[in-house]
């Protein structure tokens, strides 16, 4: 037997367990197509849904909502284009590339902050925006545009789960220090997206006497009343309303405009500025439907959708009997977005069949693809080129509807009196549009002029013909939610301008200056002190391409970078002229990886081509213009005392805050006895540092090369030479790429020659992290400037925890641009805040735990074939037993409400420097008694049945996972699991596989030795 030295070591494996392991087929596969058709049914995931399975099913049905992994993957596809057309196509002018860039960097708070700054209803719009008509419709990846709506929704959903209040910009004067004009009483009519937006921006400006008058007992307007729960859950609207209330805006419910208040009555109460945002409350009703009512089976969208949503969304204290209980055949009249919402709601309210009837052909459908594709998926019947002729009523109930056939002639719909059809119907829902026709509302508007369409004419500032009265949203003809939000945003500046200039004779800037979105996170201080220098934030430009010129450094400072290290300069006699090509993208990210998010770059660029005189004069100019920013001059020479001292003295005289000694350039300069040629010898490093410290008083840092056996030896030599600190590390020497024909890339000239260059970017991060932590552990308190793969706030924090005080960045900027700094800073603030509040104990940085739902019928069953059919059957039974199935979360991942009294407890950057060093030790000290092993556990509900865990365990691990041939559910065998963690590493689903302490029932880990010890 194997193990006693007499059996086979090859045939010992469990071949039942390995039955589905990957193999290479020796021959072409042959199978009858009829068999394949049957097999397809077994594995099919896109099984059409049956209408009866949708009754009472109010979970999300849009199909483009993302989880964290999906959001990260999608954001990585975005090119972050210059002058991005997606932004130009967003009504609220969201900086789309910026917030997607933040998502790609794992900074969900930063993304949400960017979104909410321009769009106070950012979560709603992420869920319901017709992005194919707006931002995504302009995406430069035109054949597969970015899922911008899904990304937007995910980022703000994470913000919602943080449960933080909105605050005013901390840099603005407090409310009690603002002029009297900011006490002006402002009234808004209707608490929908337009008013929420206008009120939010005005409150951010500092107005603190804003009241919204809402006719219902709940806020949200059309978003709450008419957009279904399946597209826009009630908690989303509640979140956005609460964010507005956080700023002091008041909402007065159950107050009808035209009945309880008018503009004139509000003026008597002292209100001086008004915003009308109550939408179009009345349906456009065909004369054919006069006399019909709900008891007979007739609804308009204005009577049907609110009845459904008020019950399902729990908007009011509605009785269950208020919910429309439909059955049989339901006819929807109209082809706009509202008609599609009626169709999806009708099937959930009980309809057996839904017919969408509209006057034009399919090309004339007004609904956006995001809407009507859902209706098609849910098996509604579309009947184009039809218009109502007569509704047939029998015994007081609708029995049928007759429809004329129509045609479109010269753009106009023409009915054909000779052609009509009769369609059996139990219910008819008219969705022919909305208007304002209630005279009491028109009269209450006090002179505001309405058009024949029931809308109000406004100017570019959303002002009406009546002084001090503004309007927006549906009422001004802008029907999209995002357009309504932008109307409120635009109106807020118009109202501010009116109040200040017309009522208080105070000038305002010509261009709008609306404050951005802030929470307590933004009050976190991320400044840091090192060697007597105070850095505004720990992020700076490395001595690399982003610091090629003084002007570029200035633009970096304007963007917000805290410091910069100049491109390295030397003596005139050591001037260089670079070759080209010289900076190329990596091959480390896989074959054919183009665009941003390169894992690394390789360069054969030398030091600056500009003179030392240029740099010293430029440093002086930088310090004069940016006195609060730190400027570090980078110098290089051969091992010549006079040259080092000359450069150092000139740099100090220029006004530089510190000097970096480039002892590490891995290519070219070493051939001249410079750079790496000096930096690999501790004796030379020690001496050069000593020379420079003899002649300057400002801090001096030696930039170290990773291309040595032990970087600590070099760092210690720098310390012994009286250097104030070190930079770790420069690029890693390497050969980037050899093409299939044997020529290298980059290749120079007709002879296609190359050389070993410097590799940078996050591919070298593990090397740089080791260097920083090793130096910090060996030389406690010795200042370190880190560089090498800092491509987001999270990786920046890793370097701080490893022992660095400030962080230099280059490759990430090469991937994008200088504006990355905004993402880095607010991302670091968020991480510092989260790490210091125990309420986020279940979070991993900004990664929220997966939500657990209260009701998950069919939990654990795969989502394909008969298993998916079974899931749907169980959902149907659950709905029959427990009522409508609505997303309700057991726990959102927070340990209670965030205690904001702990704001002052957020540690400084200096406090967290080196936080992780104590955890880094020798291997033999990790678990000397082998008592702390872990094993893998898998969540079958989140598993997508891909089997990646099985394959990696089979071919590179310990054969501890089996894979069911029928269900494709992997099973982790606890007794075989060694805790290697390969399975969790390749699993594509967040938190699907987790490593937990080895349970007692499994017993202590006992390695399989193969052959017992004793022979050697």
Image (spheres, rainbow, N blue to C red):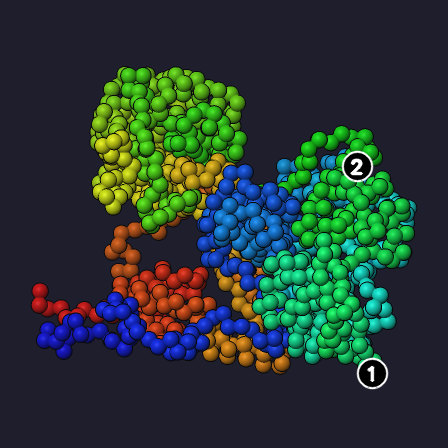
Q: Which image quadrant is residue 400 in?
A: bottom right
Identify the residue shown where x is 81% and y is 81%.
Answer: 394
Rounded to the nearest angstrom, the CA distance separating label 2 from label 1 is: 59 Å
- Residue reaching furthest to the bottom: 395
Q: Give the percent coordinates (x, y) of residue 768.
A: 33, 42
- Residue 498's tag is 2
Q: Which image quadrant is residue 432 in?
A: bottom right
On the question of residue 398 being in view, the answer is yes
User: Helix, strand, or loop for circle 2?
Assistant: helix
Q: Earlier in the sequence, mark 2 or mark 1?
A: 1
- Residue 395's tag is 1
Q: Give the percent coordinates (x, y) of residue 385.
A: 70, 64
Please identify the quadrant where the C terminus is shown. bottom left
The one nearer the camera, 610 or 639, is 610
On the question of residue 123 being in view, the answer is no
Q: Is residue 241 left or right of residue 815?
A: right
User: Helix, strand, or loop for circle 1?
Assistant: loop
């Amino acid at each position: 037997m194997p193990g006693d030295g007499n059996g086979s070591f090859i045939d010992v494996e469990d071949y039942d367990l390995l039955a589905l392991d990957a193999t290479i087929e020796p021959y072409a596969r042959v199978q009858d197509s009829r068999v394949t058709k049957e097999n397809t049914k077994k594995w099919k995931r896109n099984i059409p849904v049956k209408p009866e399975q949708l009754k009472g099913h109010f979970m999300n049905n849009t199909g483009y909502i993302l989880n964290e992994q999906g959001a990260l993957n999608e954001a990585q596809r975005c090119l972050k284009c210059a002058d991005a057309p997606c932004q130009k196509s967003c009504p609220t002018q969201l900086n789309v590339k910026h917030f997607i860039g933040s998502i790609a960097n794992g900074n969900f708070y930063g993304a949400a902050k960017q979104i909410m700054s321009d769009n106070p209803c950012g979560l709603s719009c992420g869920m319901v925006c017709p992005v194919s008509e707006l931002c995504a419709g302009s995406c430069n990846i035109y054949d597969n545009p970015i899922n911008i709506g899904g990304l937007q929704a995910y980022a703000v959903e994470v913000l919602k789960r943080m449960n933080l209040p909105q605050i005013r910009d901390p840099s603005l004067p407090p409310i009690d220090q603002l002029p009297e004009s900011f006490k002006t009483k402002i009234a808004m009519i209707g608490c929908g997206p337009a008013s929420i937006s206008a009120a939010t921006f005005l409150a951010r400006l500092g107005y603190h006497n804003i009241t919204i008058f809402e006719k219902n007992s709940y806020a949200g307007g059309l978003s709450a009343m008419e957009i279904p729960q399946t597209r826009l859950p009630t908690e989303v609207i509640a979140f956005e309303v609460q964010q507005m209330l956080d700023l002091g805006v008041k909402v007065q419910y159950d107050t009808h405009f035209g009945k309880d208040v008018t503009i004139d009555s509000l003026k008597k109460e002292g209100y001086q500025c008004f915003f009308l945002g109550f939408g179009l409350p009345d349906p456009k009703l065909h004369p054919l439907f006069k006399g019909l009512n709900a008891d007979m089976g007739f609804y308009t969208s204005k009577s049907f959708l609110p009845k459904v949503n008020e019950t399902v969304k729990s908007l009011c204290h509605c009785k269950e009997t208020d919910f429309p209980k439909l059955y049989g055949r339901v006819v929807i009249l109209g082809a706009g977005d509202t008609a599609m919402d009626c169709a999806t709601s009708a099937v959930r309210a009980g309809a057996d069949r839904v017919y969408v009837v509209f006057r034009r052909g399919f090309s004339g459908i007004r609904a956006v693809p995001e809407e009507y594709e859902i209706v098609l998926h849910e098996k509604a019947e579309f009947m184009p080129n039809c218009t109502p002729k007569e509704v047939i009523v029998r015994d007081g109930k609708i029995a049928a509807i007759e429809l004329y056939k129509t045609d479109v002639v010269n753009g106009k719909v023409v009915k054909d009196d000779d052609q009509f059809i009769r369609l059996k119907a139990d219910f008819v829902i008219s969705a022919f549009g909305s208007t304002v026709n209630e005279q009491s509302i028109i009269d209450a508007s006090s002179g505001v002029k309405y058009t024949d369409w029931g809308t109000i004419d406004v100017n570019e500032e959303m002002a009406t013909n009546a002084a001090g009265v503004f309007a927006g949203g549906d009422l001004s003809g802008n029907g999209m939610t995002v357009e309504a939000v932008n109307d409120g945003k635009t109106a807020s500046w118009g109202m501010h301008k009116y109040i200040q200039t017309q009522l208080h004779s105070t000038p305002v800037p010509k261009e709008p200056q609306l404050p951005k979105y802030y929470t307590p996170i933004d009050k976190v201080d991320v400044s840091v002190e090192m060697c007597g220098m105070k850095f505004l934030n720990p992020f700076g430009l490395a001595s690399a391409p982003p610091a090629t010129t003084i002007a570029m450094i200035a633009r970096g400072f304007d963007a917000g970078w805290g410091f910069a290290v100049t491109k390295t300069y030397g003596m005139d006699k050591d001037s260089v002229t670079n070759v080209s090509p010289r900076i190329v993208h990596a091959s480390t990210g896989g074959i054919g990886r183009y665009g941003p998010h390169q894992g690394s770059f390789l360069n054969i660029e030398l030091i600056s081509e500009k003179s030392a005189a240029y740099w010293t004069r430029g440093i002086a100019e930088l310090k004069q213009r940016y006195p609060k920013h730190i400027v570090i001059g980078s110098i290089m020479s051969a091992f010549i005392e006079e040259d080092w001292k000359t450069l150092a003295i000139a740099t100090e005289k220029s006004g530089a805050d510190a000097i970096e000694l480039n002892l590490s350039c891995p290519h070219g300069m070493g051939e001249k006895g410079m750079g790496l040629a000096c930096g690999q010898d501790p004796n030379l490093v020690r001496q050069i540092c000593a020379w420079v410290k003899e002649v300057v008083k400002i801090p001096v840092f030696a930039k170290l090369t990773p291309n040595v056996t032990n970087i600590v030896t070099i760092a210690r030599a720098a310390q012994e030479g009286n250097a104030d600190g070190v930079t770790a590390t420069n690029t890693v020497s390497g050969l980037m790429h050899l093409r299939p024909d044997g020529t290298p890339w980059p290749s120079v000239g007709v002879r296609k020659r190359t050389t070993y260059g410097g590799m940078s970017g996050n591919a070298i991060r593990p090397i740089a992290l080791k260097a920083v932590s090793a130096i910090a552990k060996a030389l406690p308190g010795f200042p370190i400037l880190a560089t090498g793969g800092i491509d987001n706030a999270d990786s920046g924090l890793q370097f701080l925890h490893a022992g660095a005080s400030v962080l230099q960045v280059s490759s990430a900027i090469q991937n994008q641009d200088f504006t990355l700094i905004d993402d880095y800073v607010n991302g670091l603030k968020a991480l510092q805040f989260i790490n210091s509040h125990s309420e986020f104990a279940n979070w991993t940085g900004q990664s929220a735990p997966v939500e657990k739902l209260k009701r998950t019928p069919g939990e654990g069953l795969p989502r394909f074939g008969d298993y998916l059919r079974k899931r749907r059957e169980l959902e149907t039974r659950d709905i029959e037993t427990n009522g409508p199935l609505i997303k309700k979360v057991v726990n959102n991942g927070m340990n209670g409400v965030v205690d904001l009294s702990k704001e002052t407890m957020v540690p400084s950057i200096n406090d967290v420097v080196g936080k992780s060093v104590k955890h880094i030790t020798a291997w033999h000290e990790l678990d000397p008694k082998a008592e702390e092993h872990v094993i893998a556990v898998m969540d079958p509900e989140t598993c997508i049945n891909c089997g990646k865990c099985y394959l990696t365990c089979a071919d590179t691990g310990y054969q501890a996972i089996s894979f069911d041939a029928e269900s494709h559910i992997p099973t982790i065998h606890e007794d075989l699991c060694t805790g290697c963690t390969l399975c969790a590493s390749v699993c594509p689903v967040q938190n699907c596989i987790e490593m937990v302490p080895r349970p007692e029932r499994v017993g202590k880990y006992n390695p399989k030795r193969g052959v017992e010890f004793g022979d050697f």
